[in-house]
Image: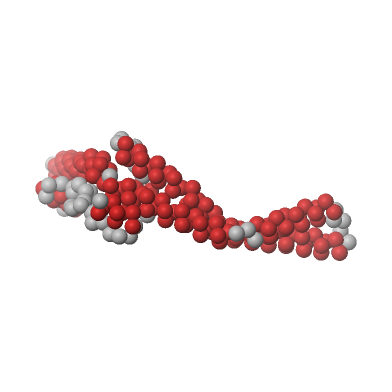
Amino acid sequence: MNTQALRFAAPRSDEAHALNDLLADRDRPAATARDAENAPRLAAEEAQRASNELAALERRALGGEAVTDANRTKVEKRLAAAKAKANEPHAERAQGARAALLDIDGQIAAYVTEHHDALNGELADDAQAAASRVNDALQEIIDAHAAREAIAARVNALASVIRRVQPGEVAWSKVEGVAREAEAVLLADGEAVPVMRAAPRVTAEFPEVADVWSS
């Protein structure tokens, strides 16, 4: 589930606020699952570091170097703590967190299905604004290119008073093709508004969704 894309950056409706709240509720089990899955590796790495450090201390001590009991005890405690951390029930924590994620994903899917019209309606305004912004940018490219070509024509005219100007002496535009494409898009009714062509079909991926759809 693409929670980042589902989240409303500036929610306006009650439905959008409620969806954001559900997505926020999802963050905790997601973080718990991620941490639990990473914990064994991190603990093993810390245990290895402490083990190497303790072995180095013993080597130095046997080599005649002064190693304090306090220093040795400190490293031993780090090693014991890392081993204890590695032996915690990380797999069970991750399993439980993933199950909780499935539960809340079902709630999110059910909520989106039930309130799709309201949520999609809020996005529709943003979709129209985005398409309009693209059209404005395309028109600006066309206008800017036309202004650039007008200057090029004046440069050519000025030089041609003195001598015949050969094609290419005035640098060709690098965006002539882009300007043509921009004109073609605007002539074809402009940028497409990013909205669904038809209502999305609901599958039984989440039982809660199927229940909402059938009610």
Task: Tell me if 136 is positioned left or right of 16 in this view.
Answer: left
Residue at the spot x=32%, y=36% of the render? 14
Q: Check the image and name the residue furthest to the front.
A: 215
- Residue at the farthest left position: 187
Please name the residue shown 73% across and 58% down the image: 80
| Image position of 12 with respect to 88: above or below | above
Q: Is residue 118 placed above or below 82 in the rendered structure?
A: above
Left-right relation of 119 to 149:
right
User: Which one is in front, 56 or 110?
Assistant: 110
Q: Is residue 164 visible?
A: no
> Which x, y percent locates residue 104?
41, 51
* Residue toward you, 164 or 199: 199
In the rendered image, which quarter is residue 59 located in?
A: bottom right
Name the residue at 44% across, 45% down: 25
Which of the colour schemes (rainbow, by chain, secondary structure, one colour) is used?
secondary structure
Which part of the image, by quadrant, shows the N terminus?
A: bottom left
Q: Is residue 24 visible?
A: yes
Relative height, residue 20 to residue 54 (above, below):
above
- Tell me where residue 73 appears, x and y as whole percent: 80, 54
Left or right side of 69 for 77 = left
